[in-house]
Amino acid sequence: MECAIQRMLEEAPYNVHLFIKDPNTNHYFIQEKLHAVFSSASLIKVPILLGVLRYLERYHQDVHQEIRIAPEEWVDYSVISEQRIERSTIYELLVWMIITSDNAATNVLIDFIGMEFLNHYFRQIGLRQTKLQRKMMDFEKLERGIDNLTSANDMAHLFSRIYQQDLLPKQFSKLTIDILSRQRVHESLKRYLVDDVKMAHKTGGLETVEHDVGIVYNGSNDYLIGVFITEVTNNEYAKQLIGRISKSAYEHLVKRKG
């Protein structure tokens, strides 16, 4: 596996950060550019999911409570906006934020608990390079170089703790995995897997980045995988590269042990 993936990295026209990790032993099967910081794109929505649930736990609030969505929060590429929804439960917003990467839902949740709370929570759970600095679709800030950031190391740490279910109360830990497992965007890590694989994951993409990270469940052979590609000029090619790396890992860690 290592040799095959290293060849892919050597031939890749882009900058590739990645990890493949055993969540039970914390052993890295392979790692590349773990500590380099890059634009998180929609990966930032995973720690936001956890941060919102932590906020509800701390202040004894109900995940099914309704909150208002102002029409000015509607943005493009959002099922919330498509439906012109003006009230929604926090639960529904969390689900849409992850499974369709809904930007309107994300922005409403950021406003609900605040960037300061979220960034403090990120640091509290050990994310050293993950920072929320702008809302989704805020291209004005993005043009000024103000972006949301993370690293492969932070994502490896985050998904390890999601897997271990040690960040939140049991019901919220299970809810986190349930929502991530209902992901509807499967153009990268699952791209070339023919088996019906259970994967709790999240994608992220902008014009110059393409990411996918998550947990692959397969009984005793569970593993974590994250592939993060920067300096992208062809997003479709980048998704294909993530798919090839993912297939190589799956065939080595699952098929050969099966």
Image: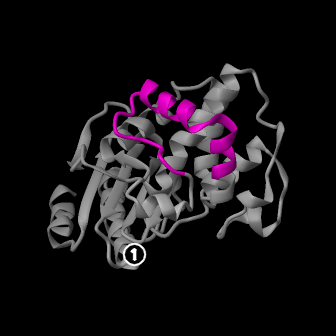
- Image color mode: one colour
Residue at 79% from the left image edge and 30% from the top image edge: 62
Task: Identify whether 111 is placed above or below 128.
Answer: below
Which residue: 52% across, 26% down? Answer: 167
Q: Position of residue 144 (x, y in %)?
A: 40, 59
The majority secondary structure of the magenta stretch comes to: helix
Q: Is residue 3 above or below residue 239?
A: above
Position above or below: 165 against 11: above
Q: Is residue 108 magenta?
A: yes
Residue 24 in the image: state x and y as whole percent: 37, 31
Mark count: 1
Res. 207 in view: yes
Quarter occupied by the N terminus: bottom left
The structure residue drawn at horizontal position 37% and vertical position 65%, both measured from the top left corner, is 209
The residue located at (19%, 65%) in the rendering is 9
Q: In the displayed structure, does residue 72 sit left or right of residue 148?
A: right
Q: Amino acid at mark 1?
A: Asn
In the structure shown, which secondary structural element does the residue marked by tag 1 occupy? helix
The percent coordinates of residue 161 (x first, y second) are 45, 31
Residue carrying label 1: 235
Residue 102 seen in the current view: no
Badge 1: residue crowd in 10 Å (few <14, some 14–19, many ≥20): some
Residues in magenta?
A: 106-134
